[in-house]
Amino acid sequence: MTTQTLDATAREAVTSACARVEEPGAGDHVDGVVPGLVARPADTDQVAEVLRAATAHGLTVVPRGGGTKLSWGVAPRSADVLLDVSALDQVLDHAAGDLIVAAQAGCRLADLQERVAQGGQRLAIDETVPGTTVGGMLAANTSGPRRTAVGAARDLLIGITMVRADGVVAKAGGRVVKNVAGYDLGKLLIGSAGTLGVITDATFRLHPVPAASQWVTAPVSDPAAALAMTQAVLHAQVVPAAVEVAWAEGSGSVSVLLEGRVAGVAGRADATRAILGEGATGSDDAPAGGATYPWDTRASGEDRSTALKLTFELSALGEVLAATAGTPAVLRGSAGSGVLYAALPPTTDPAEVATLLERLRRVCTSRGGAAVVVDAPAAVKAAVDAWGPVPALELMRRVKDQFDPDHRLSPGRFVGGL
Amino acid sequence: MTTTEDRTHVGAGIDAVTAVARRLLPEAGVITDRTRLRTYECDGLAHYRVTPALVVIPEDDAQVAAIVRACAEHGVPYVARGSGTGLSGGALPHAEGVLVVTSRMRAIREVRREDQRAVVEPGVINLDVTKAATPQGYYYAPDPSSQQICSIGGNVAENSGGAHCLKYGFTTNHVTGADFITPDGDMVALGGAAPDAPGYDLLGAVVGSEGTLGIVTATTVRLVRLPEEVRTILVGFESTDQAGAATSAIISAGIVPAAIEMMDALAIEAAEAAVHCNYPDGAGAVLVIELDGARVEVEEEYAEVARLCEDNGSFEQRLATDAVDRALIWKGRKSAFAAVGRISPDYIVQDGVIPRTALPEVLRAIAELSSSSGVRVANVFHAGDGNLHPLVLFDDAVEGAGEAAEQVSGAILDLCIEHGGSITGEHGVGMDKAKYMPRMYTDEDLDTMQLVRCAFDPGNISNPGKIFPTPRLCGEVPGRHKAAHPLQQAGLAEVF
């Protein structure tokens, strides 16, 4: 663990900028880096005040929502202030007639879902890590099975309020679904790991909750069969809401989620069973693991699995699964979108991780995607290149330099050391 | 009407860029003759006209990159242009700059059913992507009304959608990758065939940036499975209020149609005059509702939609029984803009967005504006997502009519902003609406957007003068500024 220290003047500046400022506790480190102070602003203005104080005193700042994914990416070079936005936890506006919701960054996704469900609606983004907040979901760009039908956060976010590194508050987008006025800053912030700005609220497009849903699952015993099944489902007329694959030790399952009207779902489930073959079974419940990742999301430190995100063209599914042969990798993800997550046990030798990562990276990059390390024990993070080759990195650097010229926001956590 | 004056002075760098173009491109791909240059003096918004200093028509990305590199080296501005159908002056040329026309880059490089992707060049016509994918059971969902002539490059630049965006999302939701030429002339890959490329989502920033961040020379797009069943219904109402209420009822029932389009009496009159689409007699408004998906569900939804329309006062419902019938219903809707020419010598196509629930109120307010000003307004729009297209009619031969129309048009945008909407849903800000941006966004918001432009285009040579009313010097420290902008002080920029 490395610990940050702040001089008295800087400490005083942060303390007076924000309603609650505390000394870091046991859970307040960022992947082993202990902040000098934990600031808990009550609103966007206080977030801005903290960032202005940080600017004035040259402090580094790492934002945190629910803290469920704080160890993801690369450990920051420094974290003078841990900016905890969990007090910004309100659903600001659910306009049911317009199918939109606005919520603060620290609002738990589950709370948001509960609120909009009262109007028979949902934000079609799965909670992949229990306890996740709106801001954390955006900053880490998490997604689950339902992305196959309606897309991921980038497709559902329609407005955002952010605070820049220099404390300036800015909005982009708005509260209408269709809007092309100005640059889409929301997209730049999605998946930016807290390195471009601090999200304080976000507005999303909602969908009606379907009247019926059903899963159809079939076992598969080789990568080619998994590919054939997913291709058959995708090209059929069953309109899948999700096409998931689970895989370990050379076999697994393909699961298809059907959503819609009662009669329609029943018919499409029958058709899906026919496509998936004799072993296919229907269920009202999601397959084991549901929308979560194939690793223990509560584990920390050396108990963490090595967690990988693999993206690829849809037709490369078989190759990606085959590339894990002979390894202890457990995979799960959206075969219908070309996104899989893989987990290796915490005890896996870093050299073994590096070998597999290289193999997967070769397959994924040759097939239009990438293989990145989401999280891993420190020894593994030290042994591998977490992000791998990133095209257009020079442009990304320039974007970072514009938004955060002193590199004070989450320094070093992102691609290319940004 | 606003007319940007032609300038004859041409910057010195143009000669150097012309030399590069002549070396690389076939003779027909370099235009310097003043008469031929004038062919390109405007896009679909013809009241802004600027003759470019040079037009180049490259055939591949290497040529685009070389020309942009030459522009960067000599500080020459450039503007990319596809089919030129844009309605906000986004492809308006720069008098001292190069117009890069992508109409010869029109290869559909790949259609990959197995990956649900196609790779297309910027000059490809929108509808041709669907035509190429249909034999494999797929189509390209974003469908601007001009889809028979507009190019994918323009769609990407403007993030221009269309009727089917209600259910299937906008252009930006259907673009997964791009080959991109930066304003330095470097070629970089943004995104790819797979989702979630590591790093900042630069592709998300580029789509809809109206050519101000660089030029896209190839786009990887998502293809959508053709639905099993499509039902298109034309519904007649006595008033727009009834049609609006029916729209809300359908959405509230949890039905997301592929499209819900509305036209009012004046728009219907125009469409009838132009394409004889045989819309219901005496209708104060019609809805074109399209349902698609799995057969059983479409049948159920159709029954419910029919009932909801009836409950809200529809006097006639017509279900398209075959493809010809469906095409005629859509022809009326998609030709509405051009058709307005039949009932008015001049018109402004406005493009604003409001939350759907504000539709009745805003339509009434537009009607009041129209009657108090004496300026006729025809309404044709995407009712499902609140994207209005008021057509403000006038006769330029009548003294002051153009100004009055401009005023009504601007007032409609104010209404949109007042109701929490946007000044553009698909046409873009371009040259036309830059002055409205400060009404929708604060200085801080605009300043933050400009950080993106400064990252991509610090020399401000890629389609300068569009989107933002006042450019920001890219070297300046971000933050609040109280004094006049340095460019303004230097007399180089104007505050609207």
Image: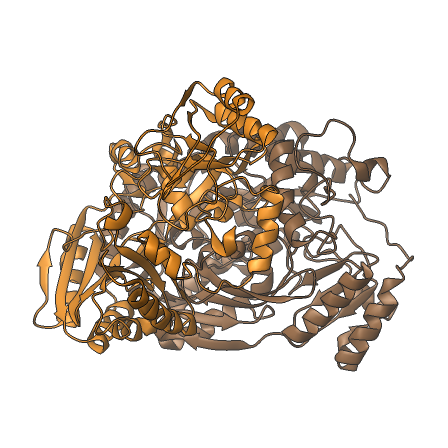
Chain colours: A orange, B brown
Q: Residue at 61%, 28% (x, y): give it.
A: A56
Q: Is residue B352 visible?
A: yes
Could you say which is closer to the camera, residue B132 or residue B382? B132
What is the x, y in percent for residue B325?
40, 63
Residue nearer the viewer, B421 or A174:
A174
- State the image coordinates of residue A379 (x, y, percent, origin top left): 33, 56
Task: Give the residue displayed 69% in from the left and 45% down from the top.
Answer: B432
Image vertical order of residue B340 relative to residue B106, above or below: above
Locate residue A313: give its quadrant.
bottom left
Could you tell whether A205 is left or right of A230 in the image? right
Instruction: Please identify the quarter of the rendering in which residue A372 is found.
Output: bottom left
Tally of numbered discs: 0
- The residue depicted at 73 percent of the width and 66 percent of the height is B69
Residue B88, image x and y in percent? Answer: 66, 50
Q: Is residue B161 visible?
A: no
Q: Tell which residue pokes out farthest to the bottom in this image.
A: B26
- Outermost residue, right side: B9
Q: Nearer the viewer, residue B391 or B376?
A: B391
Q: Residue at x 48, y 29 (%)?
A: B361
The quadrant of the picture occupied by the N terminus of chain B is top right
Report whether B343 appears left or right of B292. right
| Residue B18 screen position, x and y as percent | 83, 71
